[in-house]
Image (cartoon, helix red, strand yellow):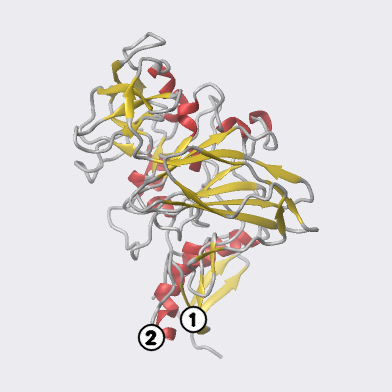
Amino acid sequence: MADEGIEVIDGGASWSSAGRNYTTVWQELSLDENSQATAGHELLHALALAHEMNRDDAFYFIKLNPSNRDEKWIENYEPLKKTDNFGFTYDFGSLMHYWAAIDKNGFYDMITMGRFYQRTIGQYEKPSFKDLAIINHIYCEDNCKGKKNECQNGGYLNPKQCNECLCPEGYGGAHCDQLEQNQNCVDLSGTPNNLEADWQIRKLKPRVRCLGAGMCSCHWRIKPKKGEKVIIKLNKPDDFKDVSDCPGICGTTHVEIKYRKDKRARGALICCANDILRQNIARNWIEAEEKDVDIIISGRLATTDEMGFELTYETDGAKLLPSCDCKNPNLLFDLKRSPGYMCEPPCKTESTCKTPIGGCAFGFLALNDKVQQNASGPLNVSCHKREGSAESFWYYWKQNDIEPVRVEEVHCVPCDREKDKGCKYKP
């Protein structure tokens, strides 16, 4: 019998200290009858994992609603000054990430910088791949000491069998370099699972069905031509629920889109039809985080019903032509995504070629999911369309000689993260 460790008790609620308590030999972990996921959450605390939104880099990924919470609440949710993240990226789908509550005005108390991640935070099904990868890094990596790690895409050696790779969702094969095989799932459209993107606009419109009862998943990989960036546009699916029935957190039936470079973290989970906008299609675009980064798409079901979705895919690099057909830039700003801030474009026309946008009172301007340095005032954007395309979009050039940002959303953040590392929310 071990001389020390974790002792599970019934303390009337679920709780644990974050990391080892050196004042006692047997560290107490209290569990109630809530759920298996709660037990996993508290066990990860005992093994030294803090809440994901307390990471010192959380300002890059989430923002808090300062208008409807007291100072004590904000202190509990604010990023810590210094955390050891072990080289792992922020994971919206971590079991250690709290969900976002909605107040009486319909505002979230915690807002993801990338809007398609809003229904990803608060997952309570099981530990994410990244959660387990960190635990392996801390406690089990020495089991395979001296073994060459040939696992790709964030996979790691199985500490119980060091000649085997454990792969993040969406990847498989001996070295995690292949697309994960479909599990108990068939795509009735017959679309190939491995796709290549170039400057031409192509469509992915699968129709998936489970082969029997239980969970099933189908997977697709969109790979860009060398040196290019994949861009996808989501179209409104008929099979997802409308906003009146949408869950605050996506459940087991969803589409997951992994577009970040580090595939160890969960992708954006989409399960609500109204998150894909009909009127302002510019906000339905998702770009890979960098050039030469694959986008992995997974459709998951926990039912015998069918599920379908539709998107188009292409790469950047097409010639941009001036246009005056862009929508009113006011449509780029969503008040519910920036509660507590004022941010109104001065332009009032429906059709325009150039305009200043933004200007956040008591904050800084963000385009899409990235804050713009020193942008406490308006930024100038111009309207363009791709050669051969009828759709026009707003673009922002930070410098004339670099690739422009296609503006999908304008919102406000409390500070310039690059300039002010210690910025704080104020109630």
Which residue is pictured at 41% across the width and 73% down the height? 137
Q: Residues within 10 Å of mark 2 (few under 14, many from 20)?
A: few
**Residue placed most toward the observer, 361 or 1:** 361
Among all residues in the image, which is located at the extreme top? 349
Residue type at mark 2 is: Lys
Position in image of residue 242 (x %, y %): 66, 30
**Residue placed most toward the observer, 58 or 180:** 180
- In the rendered view, tell whether residue 64 sits above or below residue 322: below
**Residue placed most toward the observer, 251 or 368:** 368
Q: Is residue 190 visible?
A: yes
Residue type at mark 1 is: Pro
- In the rendered view, tell whether residue 114 sits above or below residue 154: above
Q: Which mark is residue 145?
A: 2
**Residue placed most toward the observer, 318 or 345:** 318
Position in image of residue 106 (x %, y %): 54, 27
SS class, disc 2: loop
Position in image of residue 403 (x %, y %): 27, 38
Among all residues in the image, which is located at the extreme bottom? 1
Quarter of the image that includes the C terminus: top left
Say whether residue 311 is left or right of residue 295: right
Quarter of the image that includes the N terminus: bottom right
Q: Which residue is mark 1?
A: 159
Q: Is residue 23 visible?
A: no
